[in-house]
Amino acid sequence: MEFTHLNEKGEANMVDVGDKAVTVRTAEAVAALKMHPETLQKLLNAELKKGDALAVARIAGINAAKRTFELIPLCHNIPLEKVEVDFSDNGSDALYIRTFAKCTYKTGVEMEALTAASVAALAVYDMCKAIDRAMTVEEIKLVSKTGGKTDYHA
Protein backbone atom coordinates (compact mmCIF):
# COMPACT_ATOMS: atom_id res chain seq x y z
CA MET A 1 0.00 0.00 0.00
CA GLU A 2 1.34 3.41 -0.94
CA PHE A 3 0.73 6.52 1.10
CA THR A 4 -0.56 9.31 -1.12
CA HIS A 5 0.72 12.06 1.18
CA LEU A 6 4.40 11.13 0.76
CA ASN A 7 6.59 12.05 -2.18
CA GLU A 8 9.28 9.78 -3.71
CA LYS A 9 11.70 10.81 -0.93
CA GLY A 10 9.21 9.90 1.83
CA GLU A 11 8.50 13.54 2.67
CA ALA A 12 5.07 14.93 3.50
CA ASN A 13 3.36 16.13 0.35
CA MET A 14 -0.04 17.59 -0.50
CA VAL A 15 -1.85 15.35 -2.99
CA ASP A 16 -2.36 16.83 -6.45
CA VAL A 17 -6.09 16.60 -7.17
CA GLY A 18 -5.87 18.60 -10.40
CA ASP A 19 -6.69 15.65 -12.67
CA LYS A 20 -9.42 14.15 -10.48
CA ALA A 21 -13.04 14.29 -11.57
CA VAL A 22 -15.40 16.72 -9.89
CA THR A 23 -18.16 14.65 -8.26
CA VAL A 24 -20.62 15.01 -5.42
CA ARG A 25 -18.81 13.87 -2.27
CA THR A 26 -20.39 13.13 1.11
CA ALA A 27 -19.15 11.82 4.43
CA GLU A 28 -20.78 10.94 7.73
CA ALA A 29 -18.90 10.58 11.01
CA VAL A 30 -19.84 9.92 14.63
CA ALA A 31 -18.41 10.51 18.08
CA ALA A 32 -19.60 9.41 21.49
CA LEU A 33 -19.20 11.36 24.71
CA LYS A 34 -19.58 9.33 27.91
CA MET A 35 -20.58 11.17 31.06
CA HIS A 36 -22.35 10.79 34.38
CA PRO A 37 -26.11 10.29 33.96
CA GLU A 38 -26.79 13.51 35.90
CA THR A 39 -24.60 15.45 33.47
CA LEU A 40 -26.45 14.04 30.48
CA GLN A 41 -29.80 15.05 31.97
CA LYS A 42 -28.64 18.61 32.67
CA LEU A 43 -27.22 18.80 29.15
CA LEU A 44 -30.40 17.55 27.49
CA ASN A 45 -32.62 19.77 29.63
CA ALA A 46 -30.46 22.85 28.91
CA GLU A 47 -29.83 23.28 32.64
CA LEU A 48 -26.13 24.16 32.40
CA LYS A 49 -24.95 27.49 33.80
CA LYS A 50 -23.03 28.19 30.58
CA GLY A 51 -26.18 27.87 28.48
CA ASP A 52 -27.33 25.62 25.64
CA ALA A 53 -24.31 23.37 25.14
CA LEU A 54 -25.81 21.56 22.15
CA ALA A 55 -26.34 24.81 20.26
CA VAL A 56 -22.76 25.83 20.99
CA ALA A 57 -21.44 22.39 19.96
CA ARG A 58 -23.42 22.45 16.70
CA ILE A 59 -21.88 25.80 15.73
CA ALA A 60 -18.42 24.61 16.84
CA GLY A 61 -18.73 21.48 14.69
CA ILE A 62 -19.86 23.43 11.62
CA ASN A 63 -17.04 25.96 12.04
CA ALA A 64 -14.52 23.14 12.52
CA ALA A 65 -15.58 21.49 9.26
CA LYS A 66 -15.15 24.80 7.44
CA ARG A 67 -11.64 25.23 8.88
CA THR A 68 -10.35 21.66 8.59
CA PHE A 69 -7.76 22.67 6.01
CA GLU A 70 -6.25 25.04 8.60
CA LEU A 71 -6.10 22.34 11.29
CA ILE A 72 -4.96 19.26 9.34
CA PRO A 73 -1.79 20.26 7.47
CA LEU A 74 -2.24 18.42 4.15
CA CYS A 75 -6.01 18.82 3.72
CA HIS A 76 -7.32 20.81 0.78
CA ASN A 77 -9.56 23.85 1.22
CA ILE A 78 -12.86 22.30 0.15
CA PRO A 79 -15.92 24.31 -0.96
CA LEU A 80 -18.42 22.81 1.46
CA GLU A 81 -22.06 22.90 0.43
CA LYS A 82 -23.58 21.37 3.56
CA VAL A 83 -22.53 20.50 7.10
CA GLU A 84 -24.91 18.97 9.65
CA VAL A 85 -24.29 18.25 13.32
CA ASP A 86 -26.96 16.25 15.16
CA PHE A 87 -27.21 14.79 18.64
CA SER A 88 -28.86 11.78 20.24
CA ASP A 89 -28.41 9.94 23.52
CA ASN A 90 -28.75 6.49 25.02
CA GLY A 91 -31.00 7.65 27.85
CA SER A 92 -28.29 6.89 30.37
CA ASP A 93 -24.71 8.10 30.12
CA ALA A 94 -23.76 8.86 26.52
CA LEU A 95 -24.29 11.63 24.00
CA TYR A 96 -23.85 10.67 20.35
CA ILE A 97 -22.77 13.22 17.79
CA ARG A 98 -23.44 12.58 14.09
CA THR A 99 -21.97 14.84 11.43
CA PHE A 100 -22.52 15.02 7.69
CA ALA A 101 -20.53 16.98 5.13
CA LYS A 102 -21.15 17.46 1.41
CA CYS A 103 -19.36 19.12 -1.49
CA THR A 104 -19.04 18.92 -5.25
CA TYR A 105 -15.30 18.80 -5.73
CA LYS A 106 -12.22 16.78 -6.68
CA THR A 107 -11.52 15.32 -3.23
CA GLY A 108 -13.60 13.96 -0.38
CA VAL A 109 -14.95 15.43 2.83
CA GLU A 110 -14.12 12.67 5.30
CA MET A 111 -11.73 14.84 7.29
CA GLU A 112 -14.31 17.63 7.49
CA ALA A 113 -16.95 15.27 8.91
CA LEU A 114 -14.46 13.74 11.37
CA THR A 115 -13.18 17.15 12.47
CA ALA A 116 -16.74 18.39 12.99
CA ALA A 117 -17.57 15.38 15.20
CA SER A 118 -14.37 15.77 17.20
CA VAL A 119 -14.73 19.50 17.84
CA ALA A 120 -18.45 19.23 18.63
CA ALA A 121 -17.58 16.62 21.28
CA LEU A 122 -14.88 18.87 22.71
CA ALA A 123 -17.29 21.80 22.81
CA VAL A 124 -19.77 19.74 24.85
CA TYR A 125 -16.92 18.72 27.14
CA ASP A 126 -15.98 22.36 27.61
CA MET A 127 -19.57 23.34 28.41
CA CYS A 128 -20.01 20.48 30.93
CA LYS A 129 -16.54 20.19 32.51
CA ALA A 130 -17.48 22.25 35.56
CA ILE A 131 -19.86 19.49 36.69
CA ASP A 132 -18.17 16.41 35.16
CA ARG A 133 -14.44 16.33 34.47
CA ALA A 134 -14.56 12.52 34.08
CA MET A 135 -16.27 12.72 30.66
CA THR A 136 -14.54 10.80 27.88
CA VAL A 137 -14.69 11.31 24.13
CA GLU A 138 -14.92 7.89 22.53
CA GLU A 139 -15.22 6.21 19.16
CA ILE A 140 -14.71 9.01 16.69
CA LYS A 141 -15.10 7.24 13.36
CA LEU A 142 -16.09 7.52 9.75
CA VAL A 143 -19.46 5.91 9.07
CA SER A 144 -19.66 6.46 5.33
CA LYS A 145 -18.26 8.32 2.37
CA THR A 146 -19.54 8.60 -1.18
CA GLY A 147 -18.16 10.04 -4.38
CA GLY A 148 -14.84 9.73 -6.10
CA LYS A 149 -13.46 6.33 -7.05
CA THR A 150 -14.91 4.38 -4.14
CA ASP A 151 -17.72 4.50 -1.62
CA TYR A 152 -17.32 3.32 1.97
CA HIS A 153 -19.91 2.23 4.51
CA ALA A 154 -18.88 0.96 7.95
Image (cartoon, helix red, strand yellow):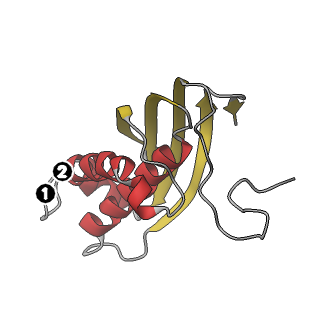
The structure residue drawn at horizontal position 12% and vertical position 64%, both measured from the top left corner, is 49
Q: Is residue 1 above or below residue 102?
A: below
Give residue 154's mark: none
Amino acid bearing label 1: Gly
The image quarter containing residue 53 is: bottom left
Is 23 drawn above or below residue 133 in the view shown?
Answer: above
Q: Name the residue under label 2.
A: 46
Tell me the kind of residue under disc 2. Ala
Say which of 102 and 33 sits in front: 102
How much space separates mark 2 and mark 1, taking CA atoms? Answer: 7 Å
In the rendered structure, the answer to whether residue 12 lies left or right of residue 81 reads right
Write down the residue under mark 1: 51
The crowd level at tag 1 (other Cα within 10 Å; few <14, some 14-19, many 20+) is few
SS assignment at label 1: loop
Which numbered disc, 2 or 1, marks the residue that appears first in the sequence?
2
Residue 48, image x, y percentages: 17, 60
The one of 66 and 136 positioned closer to us in this rendering: 66
Image point 79% across, 63% down: which residue?
8
- Give the quarter of the figure containing the C terminus: top right
